[in-house]
């Protein structure tokens, strides 16, 4: 069995398909048995099936690679932005009111300590 046939007959552990496999499938450059295997995988995964149907609607099959590259870049950028926002939200940044409340509590503690010392005669 050739190396390319082994690649198609052995999808990953999650039965996912590589970009190259999908492009060959959409371009009709696969033997019937490999095409049938990919169709079985598509039947099991409705999300992947929808994605392939969307890609099949593109007239110029050579643009698919460019489109997927652009989508991947955009997705990576969005993920990076979300991670940055999450980190910023986790960071403790008390506002002006929080500092005022902390100062009031400290003053009350000090005032209470002074009063207790005067009452007890210390």
Image (cartoon, rainbow, N blue to C red):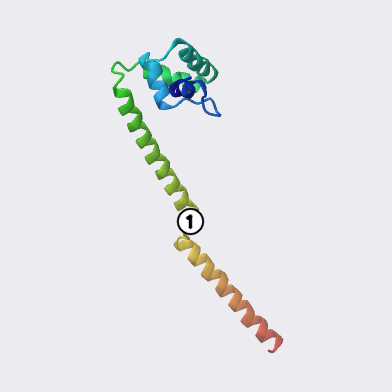
Report the residue at 48% width, 17% height from top: 38
Answer with left or right where residue 25 lies relative to residue 121.
Answer: left
Residue 16 percent location from the top left of the image: 50, 26
Give the camera-side residue of 77 and 92: 77
- SS class, disc 1: loop
Residue 120 percent location from the top left of the image: 71, 86
Q: Quadrant of the C terminus?
A: bottom right
Give the camera-side residue of 71 and 10: 10
Is residue 79 positioned above or below 25 on the image? below
Q: Residue furthest right?
A: 120
Report the residue at 45% width, 10% height from top: 32
Report the residue at 49% width, 66% height from top: 100
Residue 69 percent location from the top left of the image: 34, 32
Residue 27 percent location from the top left of the image: 35, 16
Q: Residue furthest top?
A: 32
Answer with left or right where residue 102 lies relative to residue 19.
Answer: right
Give the camera-side residue of 79 and 12: 12
Is residue 96 positioned above or below 63 on the image? below
Residue under label 1: 91
Q: Residue furthest bottom?
A: 121
Q: How many marks?
A: 1
Q: For label 1, count other residues whose C-alpha is less than 10 Å away and answer few (under 14), some (14-19) or many (20+).
A: few
Q: Quadrant of residue 59?
A: top left
């Amino acid at each position: 069995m050739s190396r390319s046939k082994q690649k198609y007959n052995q999808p990953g552990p999650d039965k996912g398909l590589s970009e190259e496999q999908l492009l060959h499938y959409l371009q009709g450059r696969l033997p019937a048995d490999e095409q049938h295997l990919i169709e079985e995988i598509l039947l099991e995964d409705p999300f992947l099936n929808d994605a392939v149907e969307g890609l099949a609607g593109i007239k110029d099959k050579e643009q698919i690679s460019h489109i997927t590259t652009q989508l991947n870049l955009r997705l990576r950028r969005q993920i990076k932005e979300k991670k940055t926002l999450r980190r910023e939200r986790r960071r403790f940044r008390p506002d002006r009111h929080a500092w005022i409340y902390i100062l009031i509590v400290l003053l009350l503690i000090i005032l209470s300590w002074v009063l207790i010392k005067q009452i007890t005669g210390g």
